[in-house]
Amino acid sequence: MLSRLRNMFRVADLRNKIFFTIVIIAVYRVGAHLPVPYVDFSAIRDLQDQSENTGVVGFLDLFSGGAITNVAIFFLGIMPYITASIIMQLLGVVIPKLEQWQQEGQVGQKKITQWTRYLTVGLALVQSTGFVFALHQGKSGLLGFAGFEGRDLIPGFNAPRAALIVLTWTAGTALVMWLGELITQRGIGNGMSILIFASVVSSLPAQGGAVYSEGSKFQFFVIIAIGIAMIVGIVFVESGQRRIPVQFAKRVVGRRMYGGQSTYIPLKVNQSGVIPVIFASSILAFPALIASITPWDGVKEFIDKNLVQSQGWFYMGMYTILIIFFAYFYTAIAFNPQQQADIIRKQGGFIPGIRPGPATERYLAKTLNRITLPGSLFLAVIALAPLLVFALWDISQFPFGGTALLITVGVALETMKQIDSQLMMRNYEGFLT
């Protein structure tokens, strides 16, 4: 392992990318602790000492690296970009123009990325406005500070101050998006995932300490053992794949003979990675914001009772359904059986025992659906297992252990693969070889 770590820094280009990524992460972490102006930060600290973040707020704070409870310039974090990406992928199914862009390759992807940026800024503007008025109206429960309703956290509130805070949070979201793209272009890649990874990892020690202080030593070590078992399971499932054999017929072109080779199509058991968990949690985050602006007390009560506290059975049921739905949805977008069957047919290949064309398409779709179900159920179990344990032992801290582990392990494996590819190009042995 040490020799492979040395290999990373022997290559000047890779070494510069790693250092550049570390610098960008440092800038991101600094922005998560710089408070916006005009907010009563001492009152925020007092509220933090007397209450804890759970439910949707805990999830949002997890993804922002503590920027929500710090009321920092990166208050919204990466969530508006994730939400915009979800919306663009959903619209790509129903809007022909977006579907055409998806089929145009790199040129079309640039157009989709540009519109995703515009939508991200628009969502950040709307969400930051809602949070500003929530802070002013004393709806501190929106930030997870229960029992402090009616306390104005923005003294001397007026239109210019509100506009400045909204502008700061919106610009912070745009800056986070730009930092992620810098890591993708000039760093080690997967910029948005790396920023989420940094946010999650930065909160793990404090949340682990909170579990230790709130529960007994036995409960703490049991939770650690469950976490280790979950990490092993995540690595096992993330590495699992169904290999579809493909045989290419021999053909003569000029005086040369081509084909006659066999290969395979790797279909991962968890084709969508951690995306379904992120999407499902993002959808469940909307009701909390709706509850802060709706005038109907019945809707507020229902949301607060069922969709804010993560230990509730209704929340867990909706969480499971959304994870399974987004697992199938994202897999259908990422892998098109019809397109894959056409590519195999045009290249003169076939799956042994399966006719080319529609029969191959049906076979690929059936196989993909069969392996996606256990993959989605695995994601649901990993995401819900810590919630069940914490609900059983009445531990309110660290409520997103499953999501945190999925993100950290998934991003770590993907990053190691990218570093491995860089090392193998230069004839060095990688981490996974």
Image: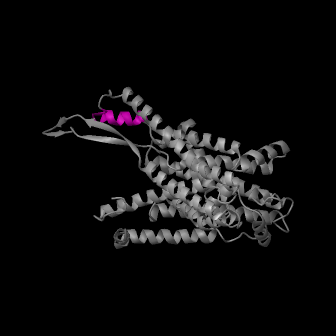
**Quadrant of the drawing holding the N terminus:** bottom left
Of the pair 159 and 88, the residue shown nearer to us = 88
**Residue 5, how many percent across, how many down?**
38, 70
Q: Residue at x 61, y 48 (%)?
A: 384
Residue 173 found in image quarter: bottom right
Is residue 362 in view from this perspective?
yes
The range drawn in magenta is 337-351
Q: Is 432 or 363 nearer to us in this picture?
A: 432
In percent of the image, x 81 and y 65: which residue is there? 153
Question: Residue 329, how many percent across, how many down?
Answer: 54, 39
Q: Is residue 97 visible?
A: no
Q: How is the image coloured?
A: one colour
Specify whether 328 is left or right of 150: left
How many dots with numbers? Answer: 0
Tell me: residue 191, above or below residue 273: below
Residue 28, given in percent of the width and then of the height, sits at: 58, 68
Say whether residue 180 is left or right of residue 106.
right
